[in-house]
Amino acid sequence: MTDVLTLAARLRELDDDRLRRVIEARGIRSSGIDDVFDLAEALSTPSAVQQALTRVDRPTLAAVQHPDAADEGTLAAAEAALLVTPPPAKPYDAVAERLAAWPAEGLPASFDGEPPAFLEREGEPADRLAAERAFTATAAVADLAFELEREPARELAKGGLAQPELKRLATLVGAEPEHVARYAALAAAAGLVASGEGLLAATDAAESFLSATPRARWRTLATAWLAQLPSGILPLLAAHPGGEWAAGLPDAAAWLFPAAGERLAREVADVLALAELLGVTAEGSPSTAGARLVTGETDDAADALDFPASGDSVYLLPDLTVVSPGPLEAGLDARLRLLADVEARGLAPTFRISGPSLIRALASGESVDELQGFLERISLTGLPQPLEYLLRETAERYGSVRVAPDPSGEADRRSRIEADSPAVLEQLAVDQALGALRLRRDGSGLVTRLDPDVVFWSLADAKYPVAAVDAEGRPVHLRREPPRRPAASVPVDHAAVILEKLHTAPAEPEQGDSAWVARQLDAAVRAKSVVTVAVELPGGKLVELTLEPASVAGGRLRGRDRGADVERTLPLSSIRSVVPAG
């Protein structure tokens, strides 16, 4: 059985950072752990040891198996992972037992040999294809962030987007649902979207992303991809910046981490799939940008992508469509998305202006004059007459429905809705899409217990010409806030809980104290370890005995003396030290 005493003694020497890394790497949960002995036992279970070994590479495994032949650095890594004891190093018993069981489980018995061949690419990198994919990816993530800012997406309880939401976003973004799921995960890693209250919504960082250039957007996403690589994968890629990654990485990773199994295979597949979407690779091999990225030239990587030039002009057509002759500058594109809906994406996007889209822009703080001036500046075809009519009509309609704080201040009357037309109020009262607002008649308006911003965005989403005003009727401009992350959704930090327990545990007695001796011996009994005890005889002389502890009770130790082959019973008060038998 595992030498729990040795491991417990080692744990006492580690600082909090080292302890946290070990606890997290082994997947230790906080339940039932109150001191270093409990932690040592938890770290020594077969499942905990196996979890540690799945994340260890072959050189480290070889050092664990033959520490006397290992180089200093690799041996230090094995010792830091608590797989071998401090010098003179040897594998902990539980680690040795796990490795001995591997051949029967189809895992290697030894860790020498050469890694599988990692073929190098023939010919030049497919940089043109990589640039096209990079541009598509940055535009898709921008579309995704924009749509999640307007309408957050519902998430599953176990994480990830619900299938109906994936399909909805796939239609809006113009990508396959499986690609949307990858883009969403990448956007979350980049901090552009975040989860909260069961929804996925855009964060404040999305605004700067939307206004950034394609190269800056790609750099943000590529950096997030790089940071999400599984441990040990980046060195493999960096060692083969011109290799056939799609063909070579799965086998190379499986050889390097022989116990990782399906977990690593899935992670590598995700890495490669997202690399293709981002233009880090093209046709399975790294682009020039991808090679620079994995070799540390992050700032120069985006410069290797030949993105198409952005323009600042569009065609405004009489049917209210906006046709771009090519990619648009980021600021212009972001403003057009505010006042028009995207109809076609790609290198030459198409938008459509409508009454609801103009109301959306007005609700964000734009004025009709500002919108008209903007459209006139960017148009290569002037301002079509139908668009002038729509702008004028929308200006007249906007604010015909108003949301304000209810002046009563009562808890069940927080918001009040008024409208220029009684017929519109009747429509609002019976609109099933607004049922969650629980609107009630009150004189010339409607009241609800919900806050004005909630009511405003509900009406705006339902495409009513709504304006937000204060108690005096002055216009106010509201920004849709992303949902808060509830405290209940934060996972338990088991490492923090364990560290807190270790810090708040009673102070450990000095060596020789009977309580401390009893705790050591109790751990030895449970682990069935052989220990050497130093016993103080009358007169002060110390005698060392090698014992197999059987029980600790009533202030006495009972165990078999390995040297004399007799059973002894010793008072704990006479035992001065307990160490694992050598």
Image (cartoon, rainbow, N blue to C red):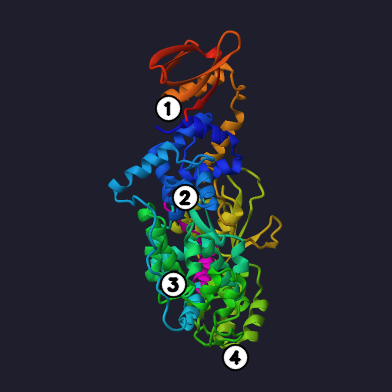
Residue 321 image position (x, y, % from top left)? 51, 83
Give the amino acid at mark 2.
Ala
Amino acid type assigned to the residue bearing label 3 in the image: Glu
Q: Which residues are magenta?
A: 138-157
Q: Give the camera-side residue of 205 and 363.
A: 205
Secondary structure at numbered mark 4:
loop
What residue is pinned by disc 1? Answer: 529
Relative placement, left or right, of 160 versus 518 is: left
Does dot 2 land on a helix, a strand or a loop?
A: helix
Q: Main secondary structure of the magenta part?
A: helix
Q: CA distance from mark 3 to mark 1?
A: 53 Å
Residue occupied by mark 2: 69
Of callouts 2 and 1, the N-terminal one: 2
N-terminal of the pair, mark 4 or mark 1, is 4
Point 64% across, 78% down: residue? 371
Please rate how many residues cluster around mark 2, counting C-alpha atoms within 10 Å: few if below 14, some from 14 to 19, many from 20.
Answer: few
* Residue 276 placement (x, y as % from top left): 44, 72
Q: Residue furthest top?
A: 538
Comparing marks 2 and 1, which lies closer to the viewer? 2
Q: Is residue 136 above or below residue 5?
A: below
Q: Is residue 327 left or right of residue 47?
A: right
Extreme residue toward the bottom, this view: 381
Instruction: Identify the residue position indicated by label 4 in the image.
Output: 380
Name the image quarter holding the N terminus: top left
First along the sequence among labels 3 and 1:
3
Circle 3 residue: 276
